[in-house]
Image (cartoon, helix red, strand yellow):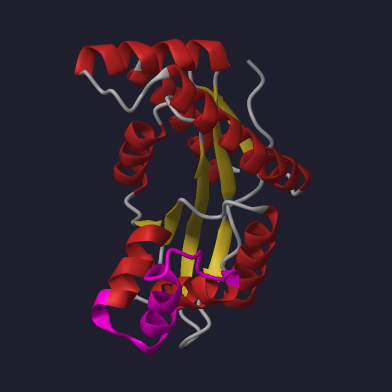
Amino acid sequence: MPMAQRTPLAVSAHSEGGATSEACQMIVFLGPPGAGKGTQSKRLLQYLSIPHLSTGDLLREAKAKDTSLGRLAAQYMDNGRLVPDPLVLAIVGEKLQEPQFATGCMFDGFPRTLQQARSLDESLAERGTPLSMALELRADENELIARMLRRAADERRADDNPQTIAHRMEVYRQQTAPLLDYYRFRNILTTIDAMGSPDEVFDRIKAAVDRLRSA
């Protein structure tokens, strides 16, 4: 299958202290339900030795620590409302200043919309650590649905029924299609064939990442 467009990994300069970090790897990982994103992202994190940044975990952490930003976020979370993008970006930016993110990170669950993607790019550009790549796991939707239905039957997961799975797929299509076009236009989108064994898929991911690192 055709592999992805490539762009050199950024050599970053963090805004605080001016410290440089070669090959700062900032990655957005995208994949539809059932494509194995959870499994593959864990393996890639270990391979690259970078941390992951989950905005869901981050918001809960900020709330639990009762930081000023966390208190603002809690006003939305406690009422079941989405936390506004500027607040999410502020919390993300604050987290990225921690030492473990000096060599990069993988964004999990963010961005979800085109506006979030643009805001994230602006925030990272200000820090001097632009996105290195956006990884997309792609597979035939019918195959993914069949895979999830088999898993639901094996694990007796009543919540994974055909209607629920179809809805999750539709939400993913609506949210992600604009992001894919956006990152494709920026020439940082890497599309990976997600069909095959976990090892086969990860070999494809490693090959794409290694080409990027050596560019």
Q: Is residue 111 left or right of residue 203?
A: right
Q: For residue 2, which quarter of the picture?
A: top right
Q: Is residue 178 within the magenta segment? A: no
Q: For residue 71, which quarter of the picture?
A: bottom left
Quadrant into which the C terminus falls: top right
Q: Nearer the viewer, residue 168 or 29?
A: 168
Q: Is residue 32 above or below residue 179?
A: above
Q: Is residue 98 above or below residue 118?
A: below
Residue 13 visible in the snapshot: no
Q: Nearer the viewer, residue 149 or 36?
A: 149
Q: Is residue 72 within the magenta segment? A: yes
Quadrant into which the N terminus falls: top right
x and y percentages locating residue 22 in the rendered image: 48, 63
Q: Nearer the viewer, residue 57 or 174?
A: 174
Residue 80 visible in the snapshot: yes
Identify the residue at horizontal 57%, vertical 36% (top origin).
Answer: 172
x and y percentages locating residue 187 in the rendered image: 73, 44
Magenta-colored span: 64-85
Q: Is residue 177 left or right of residue 132?
A: right
Q: Is residue 90 above or below residue 172?
A: below
Q: Is residue 195 left or right of residue 61?
A: right
Q: Nearer the viewer, residue 214 or 175?
A: 175
x and y percentages locating residue 18 in the rendered image: 50, 84
Residue at the far front: name it. Answer: 79
Identify the residue at horizontal 43%, vertical 63% (top origin).
Answer: 80
Q: For residue 184, which quarter of the picture?
A: top right
Identify the residue at horizontal 58%, vertical 44% (top origin).
Answer: 134
Identify the residue at horizontal 59%, vertical 75% (top origin).
Answer: 86
